[in-house]
Image (tube, rainbow, N blue to C red):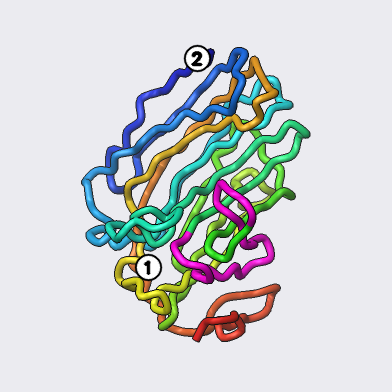
Amino acid sequence: SAHTAMAPCRCGSPRGLSLAALAMVLCCVPIARAVTSHLQLTPRKTAAEAQATQLQASLTWKEVSPPNRDVYMSFSVALGDGIQPKAGAHGRCNSGYMGAQFRADGSNTLLWSMSGREEGQVVPVSEYCHYDCFDCSPPNRRDFQCKRDDYKLSIGVIYTFTMQLELQNASGAMWSVTVFDPSAAGAGQLVEVGRVFFKDREFGLPTEVCRVLGVDPYAFQEYWNSKQQDHTTRASWSAIAYSGVMKPQDTEGYCQGGAQGSLLDLKGVT
């Protein structure tokens, strides 16, 4: 059986004074388990009303005991809302989650994964992103995953995840996910998780819907290794904030490997 405990979860203001704390103690669990917490923003708004182009949420790992366990703490992300359900995006243009993992081998993983509606709808831009199959297999050209296995996480540090619109043109928009680590030397360090270009016009998707963030988030903590038992992990999301609006319209304006990059270099983007 599994024994779960969830702290009160509340998003009390549009400035992100919120906390979603999850805790789970496992005892002889034969399959992977997850604890999910749905968050309610105040004031309540639809994606169209909010017009948010940036999401920030801070993740703090509080306990992983014993340390050689696999666990994922995630926050849901989506583009748009209120359109006809299709494929893994459901009623959105794209949907998925971002977050971080502690791994049994002592490593850590930063993740950003999303599912789309149509083959070729997304174009991975950064070196950390690739086509994937969202919670399925084999990979397709509708879904993607951005993954960093080379960054070490620590207990007690507040890591701030940011998903934001970077630029857009007639074809679609490029979004990024970064993590700010305040414990890094100096004034802290901004870590790129990935950048992906989302096409909308080619597939008849409304740009005014697909280029803003969905604002009905949930968080979950997942144990995916059924062979691991008898362990405790605690983590929380806090300071959750949606903001905007940014309306760049150009094919230039981002960096790739230290040099200026152009969206014209991406296949299928005009």
**Disc 2 target residue:** 3
Would you call the spot at circle 2 few (<14 residues within 10 Å), some (14-19), or many (20 or more)?
few
> Would residue 167 be visible to someone looking at this image?
yes
Which badge, 2 or 1, is on the more N-terminal residue? Answer: 2
Question: Judging from the image, what secondary structure is the residue with disc 1 in?
Answer: loop
**Disc 1 target residue:** 211
Above or below, 41 relative to 142? above
Q: Nearer the viewer, residue 117 or 197?
A: 117
Q: Which residues are magenta?
A: 116-138
Image marks 2 and 1: residues in contact by CB distance under 8 Å: no
Q: Residue at x 72, y 48 (%)?
A: 149
Q: Nearer the viewer, residue 184 or 107?
A: 107
Question: Judging from the image, what secondary structure is the residue with disc 2 in?
Answer: strand
**Number of marks in picture:** 2
**Magenta residue check for 260:** no
Above or below, 34 relative to 124? above
Q: Residue at x 59, y 18 (%)?
A: 29
Q: Is residue 135 left or right of residue 203?
A: right
Q: Is residue 120 left or right of residue 109?
A: left
> Would residue 192 be visible to someone looking at this image?
no
- The chief SS type of the magenta part is loop
Above or below, 22 relative to 172? above
| Residue 75 percent location from the top left of the image | 47, 43
**What's under tag 1, amino acid-wise?**
Arg
| Residue 21 percent location from the top left of the image | 45, 29
Q: CA distance from mark 2 to mark 1?
A: 40 Å
Which residue extends farthest right? 105
What is the number of the mark on residue 119?
none
Would you call the spot at circle 1 few (<14 residues within 10 Å), some (14-19), or many (20 or more)?
many
Q: Residue at x 24, y 43 (%)?
A: 42
